[in-house]
Image (cartoon, helix red, strand yellow):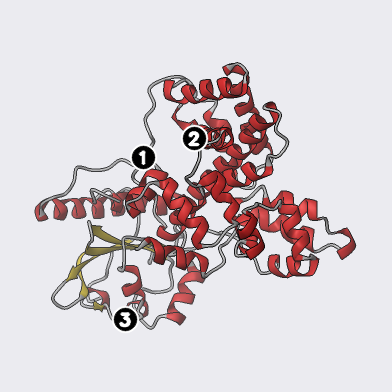
Amino acid sequence: MDLANWFQSISERRWPILPGTLEGVRDACARNNDLISFTDLANLCLSDPLLLFDLLRVVGGSRALQRNESIPSVEQTLMLMGLEAVVGRFGKLTAMHIIPDKLDAEVVEAVEDWLGRSRVAALIIKEWLSISGEHKVEDCFVAALIYNLPACLYLIYRNQLPDKPLLQEVADHFETDYSKLLEQFVRAVPLPVGLLTLLGGGAPSKRKQLLKLAVATANTLEQGWWRGPWNVGLDVVGKLIGISQQQVYLGVVQACLTVARQPRAPAYTYPARALLFIEGEYKRPEMKKAVALTSPDQLEQGIRESIRHLSNDLKFERVLYYRYDHDSHSLRLKYQVGLAEGHALRKLAVELEPGTFFTLLTSKAQSFHAPESVRNQLVRKYQDDFFDHIGDSEFAIMSLYLGHRLVGVFYVDNGRSGRVIDDTSYHRFKELVARLTPHH
């Protein structure tokens, strides 16, 4: 997607916030007007970059702010909006949940992780500026919270874990440096233009350098506190603000612990966990990938082995693999386990007509888990013939892509016993199918 179009799609809609934050916002706004505290609401905004983003968008286009290039404090922003406007806007917020076909559990976890890193970076820069004797810290605090935000929105938008380090993947996808992308993001949404003093180009300053180092420190904690490149940043900070590297490190530890003790999401604890890693060679955790299946024979063999594994080891009672037929633009059953003789699905060709469930599913590489309630919604919403023949059990389904080419669709259920598909079985199903592709 073109960067300008992507920014436009971001600015045209409101985005969900963390469930824990939404609960706090609703509790705060449910009080009698005389008891609603702007300070409490401001602290909620500063604990969740997604909520902060929702607030800053209200004032981002202000001509007054654009003229003096200032960043208003969050509490000032809330007070300028007024209690009624704040309660009205925050009353329409939604929470980021795991939604089949919309937001994968692993993606939600990754978003929470990167938001937590932003929060750690904000506390780190606050500590470093305070040691330097600077009392104006909220502008840098806010800038640190905003830094990872485009990358988090990219994760939500793509609903797919990155193959590379996240910021690098975002930069590579849009073929621009992340710092330049961030600058365009602030202008396009728009956010208060004063953020560009800290996040944009222009003259270097001690504050900008410390901010950049704080973000880099928080974002790379998982690579190991003992690694040379990570400690070089702490050395630079120590020289800039006149303290020992050990004091700088203790400030980082304190920031991680503070975020972990007051988490807005479970993944807010991950930076603190990273400090407990045992010294050793760092390897980025990733799902195992099979050797790229370059030939049709290799792919076919991999599909057959996956079907056996899904049936024999994961104990799915019905396993179907539909091959995509390019000429007829339809899905046709190629392999199956568990279908009775003469079953209608054996001969059913799934036409990929506009507006159907399978057209949506096969529009990209993705998976879908449909418990009974979700399955019933799908039946009502989509009139696909397929649903008439699978029975009432829940199911899991996943499209298979090689590069940008649709290959087929895997479908599993427990159609005989009606046994539920638990999260572990669903994730093993997804991982198994994903391993068939060299890039997933």
Between 223 and 128, the residue placed more toward the observer is 128
Helix, strand or loop for disc 1: loop
Quadrant for the N terminus, please.
Answer: bottom left
The amino acid type of the residue labelled 3 equals: Pro
Give percent across and percent down for residue 409: 27, 64
Looking at the image, residue 389 sits to the left or right of residue 37; the answer is: left
Question: Is residue 417 among the parts visible in the rendering?
Answer: no
The circle on residue 286 is: 1
The x and y percentages for residue 179 are: 44, 46
Q: Is residue 59 above or below residue 302?
A: below
Answer with mark 3 or mark 1, whichever residue precedes in sequence. Answer: 1
Q: Is residue 390 above or below residue 265?
A: below
| Residue 210 picture quarter | top right
Q: Residue 340: x, y in percent?
A: 26, 70
Q: Which residue is mark 3?
A: 354
For residue 20, side relative to residue 411 (left or right): right
Q: Secondary structure at mark 3?
A: loop
Q: Which residue is mark 2?
A: 216
Instruction: Please tell me whether residue 318 is drawn above or below residue 74 in the rendered image.
Output: below
- Mark 1 touching mark 2, by CB under 8 A? no
* Element type at mark 2: helix
Q: CA distance from mark 2 to mark 3?
A: 45 Å
Give the Cα separation between the discs numbered 3 and 1: 35 Å
